Image: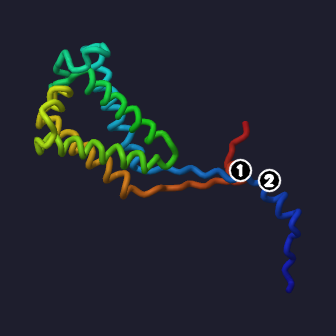
């Protein structure tokens, strides 16, 4: 009764003067960036060593960081890492893509460990049980981070920033 409410125009002018900026981040982004950079580096080093000839993607098999690598595996690792880096740089993380990549790595590792895949898969990729364990661990951590890591938001307004800005 005694308070005066601003009309619609004054409220719109006040909103126009005070833009709001929201920053979203998640710990899942850090997980995606760490594993993504690692897989890009591993795949890039293997591609540098093996080369990539489209008619011979399964040969030669070389050791990079004590892991046997073929050109096909190196290209797959570099692509996997690049997609993980992409999910890590998007605000809040692309959780669905990160979960899909984690599940795919977990599935590949399970196939390699259970020997359910045909022998061709071991020859094409040049890997064994040690690589299977590595992909199970990486896939599990990425999938878990994508599913349970919270999102944090930080909201600031232009007036708040202006009040704390030091003018020299």
> How many residues crowd around disc 1 within 10 Å: few (fewer than 14), some, or many (20 or more)?
few
For residue 139, what is the image quadrant? top left
Q: Nearer the viewer, residue 136 or 3?
A: 136
Q: Are marks 1 and 2 in contact (CB under 8 Å)?
A: yes
Is residue 52 in sight in this rendering? no
Residue at position x 25%, y 46% in the image? 106
Extreme bottom residue here? 1
Expressed as whole percent of the image width and height from the top left, the position of residue 156 reads: 64, 53
- Provide the residue designation for mark 1: 158
> How many residues crowd around disc 2 within 10 Å: few (fewer than 14), some, or many (20 or more)?
few
For residue 60, what is the image quadrant? top left
Q: For the N terminus, which image quadrant?
A: bottom right
Report the coloring of the rendering: rainbow
Q: CA distance from mark 1 to mark 2?
A: 8 Å
Instruction: Tell me the tag on residue 121.
Output: none
Q: Nearer the viewer, residue 75 or 34?
A: 75
Question: Does dot 1 land on a helix, a strand or a loop?
Answer: helix
Expressed as whole percent of the image width and height from the top left, the position of residue 168 reads: 73, 36
Count how many numbered circles sit on residues in the image: 2
Residue 136 vertical position relative to residue 80 in the rendered view, above or below: below
For residue 87, side relative to residue 51 (left or right): right
- Provide the residue designation for mark 2: 17
Is residue 153 in sight in this rendering? yes
Residue at position x 11%, y 37% in the image? 129
For residue 60, side relative to residue 14 (left or right): left
Q: Nearer the viewer, residue 46 or 21?
A: 46
């Amino acid at each position: 009764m005694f308070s005066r409410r601003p009309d619609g125009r004054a409220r719109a002018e006040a909103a126009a003067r005070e833009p709001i900026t929201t920053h979203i981040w998640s710990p899942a982004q850090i997980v995606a960036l760490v594993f993504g950079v690692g897989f890009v580096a591993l795949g890039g080093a293997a591609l540098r060593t093996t080369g990539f000839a489209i008619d011979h993607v399964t040969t030669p098999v070389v050791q990079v960081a004590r892991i046997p690598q073929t050109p096909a595996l190196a290209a797959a690792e570099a692509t996997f890492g690049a997609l993980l880096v992409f999910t890590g740089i998007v605000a809040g993380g692309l959780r669905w893509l990160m979960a899909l990549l984690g599940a795919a790595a977990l599935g590949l590792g399970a196939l390699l460990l259970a020997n359910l895949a045909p022998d061709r898969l071991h020859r094409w990729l040049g890997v064994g049980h040690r690589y299977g364990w590595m992909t199970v661990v990486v896939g599990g951590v990425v999938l878990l981070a994508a599913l349970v890591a919270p999102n944090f938001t930080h909201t600031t307004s232009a007036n708040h920033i202006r009040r704390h800005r030091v003018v020299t």
